[in-house]
Amino acid sequence: MQLLEVHQGATAKEFSDAARVVYKDDSNWVCPLDNDIDAIFDAKQNVFYENGEAARWVLKSDDGKLIGRVAAFINRSKAFHYAQPTGGMGFFECVDDEAAAFALFEQSRLWLQQRGIHAMDGPINFGENDRYWGLLVEGFVAPGYGMTYNPPYYKKFFEDYGFKVYYEQVSNHLDLTKPFPERFWKIADWISKKPGYRFEHLDVKQLDKYVDDFLYVYNSAWAFHENFTPMNRTDLLRSFTKAKPILDERLIWFAYVDNEPSAFLILVPDVNQILIHLNGKTSLLAKLKFLYYKRKKTITRGRIVIMGVIPKYQKAGIESGIFKHLDEVIKPLNQYKELELSWVGDFNPKMRALHESVGAVFGKRHYTYRKLFDDGLEFKRSYVIPVDTKHKRS
C-alpha cells in the first residue's frame, strides 16, 4: 500500500475521489460538495487554523488504486484541556479492508503523537460539530445535510483498532404530517402570550444583530458542556454568509424576554435532496441543476442543526413557543413533511427530553469515539450535563 500526504492539485482531487470509490454502489450516500470539504483544509477559509493545524492523506493499493483517505488535526484551544491532550481524526473513508483502515488510523495517531497529543477523537470535523461529526452505527438511510454517513463495517474497524465510545449521538425524526402532542401546544400558547416574551425569525438584512444574539445565547447555554470554548464571531458570520443560498430566514427563530436574547433554533432545508444529483460538483451545469430542483420544491425535509436556551429560561417553556411560531410558518409552505432533530449527545438529557416532548421518534445513532494512545490509562466517557444548570460545575 502507498500512503500519500495531500497537497494541492492531484492529491486534493484524489482525497475527494476516495469517497466516490467507497460509495459507488450505495444509493443512500450523498456526495458533499468538493468545495466544502476543500475549504475545511484551507487556512484562508477555516478559522480553526488560527490556533490549530491539520494534515490529510490518501491511501492507494500496490497497483495504484485509491482505497482510502483520512485527516488528522489539532484544535489547540481545546486539545490540552483534557486529562490526556486530545486531537482529532476524521473524513475517514476506506474500502472493506482492515489492514488499509488500520494504516490510516495509525498515520493519524503518529502525526498527532509527534505533536504532543496523547489521544484522538474520531471521526470528527476540523470545525464546529454541526457537520461531519460521528460514526453512523444505526439508521443507515439517506443522511441529512451535513450529517455523516458511512458503511456499517466502519464500526468494527474503529473498535478493533481500540477506539472506545466517548459519547453517543442521537438524531430523532419529526413527522410534520402528524399533530404535535396537545400538551405541547398548550404550553406554547401560554408562553407566547406572556408579557415581555417575543419571537422573531432571522432577517438577513440585520445579520450582524442576529449573529450577536446567537453568540449571547450560545455562550451562556453551552458553558456547561465539557471543555467549552466560546464560538468565534468572525467564523460564525462567515458561515451564515456562506450559507445564504440554502438558508430560509423564516426557518431560523429567536426568542427574547424583556429584549434579552433567550433562545434560538436554526432549521436548514435538507439540500442533500438536491445535492444527491450533483456528485459534489459546483460547475455551471451543477448550479443550474441546483436551481432547477430547488424551484421544483424537491426539498421536503429540514434539519434542526442547533437549538439553545440560556439556563434561566430552560424550564420556562420557551422552546415550545419557538416551535409554535416555526410551525405557523412551515404549514402554509406546504412543502416540508419531516424534520430531523440532530444531533443530541447522551451527555445532554434535557435536550433529549425535549425531542420526546414534541413527538419525535428515533432516526439515527452516531458514536464519537476516543482512542487513548496509552492503553494502560483509565478511559472515561464524556461528562453528562446536569439537568439543573443554574450553576456551572467547578
Image: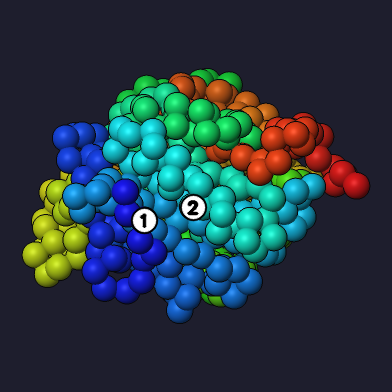
Nearest the eye: 318 or 218: 218
Towards the viewer: 121 or 392: 121
Q: Does residue 339 appear left or right of residue 74 in this picture?
A: left
Give the left or right position of residue 211, taking residue 242 as reference: right
- Disc 2 + disc 1, Cβ < 8 Å: yes
| Marks 2 and 1, the one that precedes in the sequence | 1
Q: Which mark is residue 3?
A: 1
Residue 214 appears anywhere in the view? no
Label 2 to label 1: alpha-carbon separation: 9 Å
Q: Amino acid at mark 1?
A: Leu
Residue 141 image position (x, y, % from top left): 31, 29
Q: Where residue 149 sits: x, y (%)?
A: 36, 38
Callout 2 secondary element: helix
Q: Which residue lies most toward the left here?
A: 285
At x 42%, y 60%, the residue is 56
Locate residue 279 relative to residue 175 in the image: left or right: left
Characterize the local packing of mark 1: few (<14), some (14-19) or many (20 or more) Cα atoms within 10 angstroms.
some
Q: What element does badge 1 sit on?
A: strand
Residue at point 32%, 49% (across, down): 1
Which residue is rendered at x = 59% and y = 75% of the image?
50
